[in-house]
Structures are given as structure tokens and as C-alpha cells.
Amino acid sequence: MSLKQVPLHHIHQQLGAKIVPFAGFEMPVRYTSDLDEHNTVRNAVGIFDVSHMGEFVLKGEGALGLIQRVSANDASVLFDGKVQYSYLPNGRGGIVDDLVIYRISDLEYMLVVNASNIEKDWNWISQYASDYDRNGGPVTLTNISDDTCLFAVQGPMAAKALQSLTDANLESMSYYTFEKTDFAGCANVIISATGYTGAGGFEIYVANNQAETVWNAIMKAGEPYGIKPIGLGARDTLRLEMGFNLYGNDITDETSPIEAGLGWVTKFTHDFIDADVLKAQKEQGVPRKVVGFEMIDRGVPRGHYELTDADGNLIGEVTSGTQSPTLGKGVGLGYVQTAFSKPGTEIFVKVRDRLLKAQVVKLPFVKK
């Protein structure tokens, strides 16, 4: 299957990015070094082109009902300009995808999904849409993924770097809210106080024909604050330091959302796919849980490494791991038997034939 390119692919090439295949796209993994880019976002401001992400628009009287059916969080509490993190249960106790829900109005919502799952999510939601057309009022779904660019401007200086480009008051924008407004001279741009780094900042949704104008304006406005383009390598270490899940690694069609620590966005105030199964798991407990752990011995945990007890007995598996640039030590996420999930518990990571000591810790690894 041929790889797709984001609309600003040529700009990333001009900037000297190393381009790699990711989620069906040719994506910039780094421009300089992962460490430099990571620290730029943690300490100043960086810009990611994450236009590979998927966006669906749901409109009509049945839009909310459809969202309530297919997602586990309670979207009825949303108001115009509010964003919500959620996931799509898959009907057999696993996860189709995790996603972000934007309420544009009471009759219009935008769902933002992972790039690797665009077609899968579209097919999954579409099969339930016809029910709502009949029972909950009309609803239309539009896949705007190929027409939309998304830039994540992240870091403690993000608001200052962007403020000259908009009349929206960025400093006062609450976490997980958004405004649809003029930005860099372009109309109908969504500025969202969201992100995947834990460093603060904004995500900017623009039409493809506005993308280059907006990218160049952000780079120019951010110059005094040291803005740099940032690749997927640093995006991964930044999200891992916060303990954020990555679909395909930490959550999949085979992982229970209760095991995955997503009980906080599983709301039994409405009827949704798998609600009964997940409620029973929440009440009765689950045999394994996702945990964050820090290395005590020197070593870097990697996905699929075995997790053991002190005697080398298998108790779980690493799903994501890296050397934390901020902490200077190895950190990871993984599933362990519930008896080993309490913070402070000593566990071991099997690296080749050696058992390296680690400790379960409360997430996030890097406190804000």
C-alpha cells in the first residue's frame, strides 16, 4: 500500500526532516535530535505537524445520541467550545480507538481519531449511524481528514508565541476548550487548548489551503520564543513522560479499558456499547492493570520486554518504554498482574537474560 503525504510534506523536506513511514503516512520523525526537540517543547515551544490525524464531523439531531452510543464518556455534559477525551468500546471488551470529541454546537460535533484507525473508526461509527437516522433524529457523518491540517504548538511559551496571530485570549483559555475564530488572517480556524505532551499549548485545525500560510505565520511569530519544528520521536518521549496511552501499543482491540486505566472516562450515566461488561469489571476488579514504572537499575525498557517478579516469574509485559530525557532514567508503561500494580512495588524488566530492577510509580512520570 502506498504511503500518503501530509500537505506540508515539502516544507518538512526543506527543513531537513528525517521522514519515516508512520500510520500509513510519510511523517517527519526528527529535524535535529530527539533530545533537543524534546527539551525545546518542555522548556520553550515547538510545532508538530500532525495532519495525519483523522477528523469526522457529525451533524444533526441524532449526533449526540450516536456519540453516546459508541463512546464510553458522557458527551451530554459538553457545552459549545468544550472538548472531551473518550474511547470507542469494540463490543467484545476491547477498544476500537481512543479519540477526542469537540462540541461545536448542540447539533454539530467533531471527532478526532488516530491516523492508523481512520478507516476502521469510520466504518465502526457509520454502522451505528443508520440506527440514529431512524430512531434519534437525522445524523450525517462527514470525513474531513483529507481536507484538514493539524498543527500542535506545545510548550510553556506556546500562548505567548501565538497570541499575536489571534484576538482569542490564549492565556485565559481553559484546558480542553476551543474557539473557532480568525487566526493568522485565516477564517474558521479551530484553536484548541489540548495536546499530547503535558507541556501545555494548543492544537490548530486549518483547511489544507490555509495550512502553509498558518505554518509560516506560526514559525515567524514564534521566532522570539525559540520555536522549532518537532518530529514524532520527541512526541513519543513527551507523551510517555506523561503516561499518555498510544493506540497500538498501550491500548488495542484486545485490551480492556478498565485494565488500561480508562475507568475515569467510562461513565455509566448512559447506555453505550459494552457498558454491562465494563461495569462488571469495574465492580469485580480485573486480573491485570496498566502501570507506570521507573528503572532503578540502568537500562531502557522497550515494548514487549517481559516483566517479572524477583524470582523471574512472568507477571506482565512492557507496552511502551524509553529513556526519559527529563528524568535521565528509563521509564515505561506495561500490564502487570493486579497484585503487582500498587505504586512502590518492586518489579523486574527482563533485558536479554538479565533481570533489571524497576519500581511501579504513580503517573505522570514528570509532574507539571
Image (cartoon, helix red, strand yellow):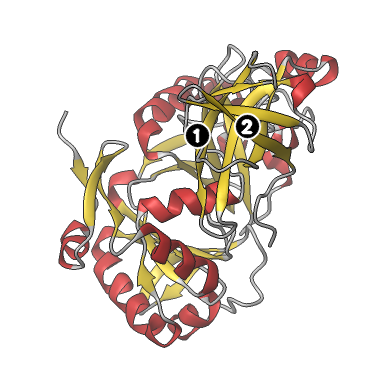
Front-lying residue, 200 or 104: 200
Report the residue at 80% width, 32% height from top: 342
Is residue 178 at all visible to an observer of this figure?
Answer: yes
Q: Amino acid at mark 2?
A: Gly
Q: Name which quarter of the figure residue 189 lies in.
A: bottom left
Q: Position of residue 211 (x, y in %)?
A: 28, 65
Mark 2: few/some/many CA within 10 Å (<14, 14-19, 20+) = many
Sequence-first disc among 1 and 2? 2
Front-lying residue, 92 or 182: 92
Front-lying residue, 116 or 273: 116
Which quadrant, please, contains the N terminus?
top left
206 lies above or below 291: below
Report the residue at 56% width, 38% height from top: 245
Is 268 left or right of 78, judged from the image as shown?
Answer: right
- Return the residue found at the far front: 354
Is residue 196 at all visible to an observer of this figure?
Answer: no
Is 268 left or right of 133, judged from the image as shown?
Answer: right
Helix, strand or loop at disc 2? helix
Q: Position of residue 361 (x, y in %)?
A: 73, 41
Contact flag, marks 1 and 2 (Cβ < 8 Å) = yes
* Mark 1 → mark 2, Cα distance in angstroms: 9 Å
Q: Name which quarter of the figure residue 186 lies in.
A: bottom left
Report the residue at 74% width, 14% height from top: 276
Q: Position of residue 6 (x, y in %)?
A: 24, 51
Q: What residue is shown with label 1? A: 139
Which label number is shown at residue 65? 2
